[in-house]
Image (cartoon, rainbow, N blue to C red):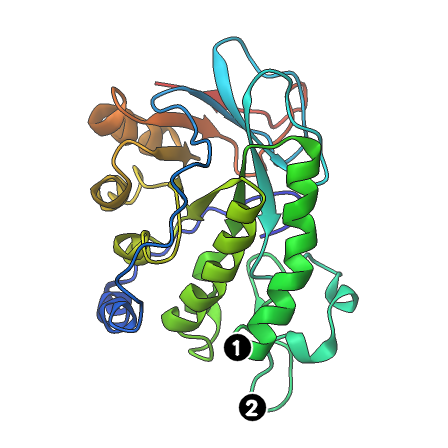
Amino acid sequence: MSHLNSSPRMLTWAAIGAAALMAAALVPATSARAASVPLPPTHAGFDYQIGGAYSPPAGVKIVTRDHTASPAAGLYNICYVNAFQAQPGAEGEWAADLLLRDSAGKVVYDKDWGEALLDVRSEAKRKRIAAQIGTQIDGCRDKGFQAMEPDNYDSYTRSAKLITAANAQAYIKLLSARAHADNLAIAQKNTAELAGNRNANGLDFAVAEECGQYDECGDYTSAFGNEVIVIEYTDTGRTKACRGWGSTLSIVQRDVDVSPAGSGGYVRKTC
């Protein structure tokens, strides 16, 4: 996703279920999670500020902001990093061979957001990409964030089948190790079909867009318990999420552009 902005992933993938089960067989059974990292409080006031930082509303205890922003004083802060795709127009920040290309040599894009996918298919490339993203993770640590949210874990579903679920999981393990080395918790962003592998992949909590809208909240709670933060983008999604999970999860409705408070498109509603 992009322009300091997180995309609602509106696809539910019946066909991916079988692929995810196959990928799970490739993932070691031992847990890579770090027991000592500080986790976000459960069922707490949350605000999603990746479209621009502003003073958190009263009652907010958890804030997500872009890695270029500063954390909110006195709150639990999650640092947003676009970890699986290049920001729009930022392809030049990556070595040419680290951008995913099709059989004709053309860069593969997330068409909804105009972002080039990163090529995490080989171990060598995964390590190089993780090293570059790792500088952003270190920056999150240095600024005082307590956790990181690596976006576009599900980019393999938009890769024209070039990237596999196993590739994505092998890469996110590298990010988990870097985050934990920095004493940061790391979130699983969306990708409900891989939630059952969270321990092996080293993931500490979940950030789920539109799980109420698409009846996926239970997929996350079955793997993460109450360590789930929910962002909805419609009244319908918020109502469904609040009806089923409002007493246990952190839930907020934002506008799709995640507009800063005071701007014309700003929407923020809670249960």
| Mark 1, residue position | 123
Q: Is residue 226 above or below residue 198?
A: above
- For the residue marked with disc 1, what is the amino acid? Glu
Secondary structure category for the residue under label 2: loop
- For the residue marked with disc 2, what is the amino acid? Ser
Residue 115 at least partly seen: no
Query: Residue 51: image x %, image y %?
Result: 64, 35
Query: Which callout, 1 or 2, points at the residue further toward the start of the chain?
Result: 2
Q: Residue 76 or 118: which is nearer the viewer?
A: 76
Query: Residue 169: image x %, image y %?
Result: 41, 64
Which residue is at the far right?
92
Residue at the location (38% across, 40% down)?
A: 35
CA gap, disc 1 to disc 2? 20 Å
Q: Residue 85 or 13: which is nearer the viewer?
A: 85
Q: Is residue 149 left or right of residue 53?
A: left
Residue at the location (60% across, 61% down)?
A: 85
Q: Is residue 149 left or right of residue 247?
A: right
| Mark 2, residue position | 103
**Quadrant for the C terminus in the image:** top left
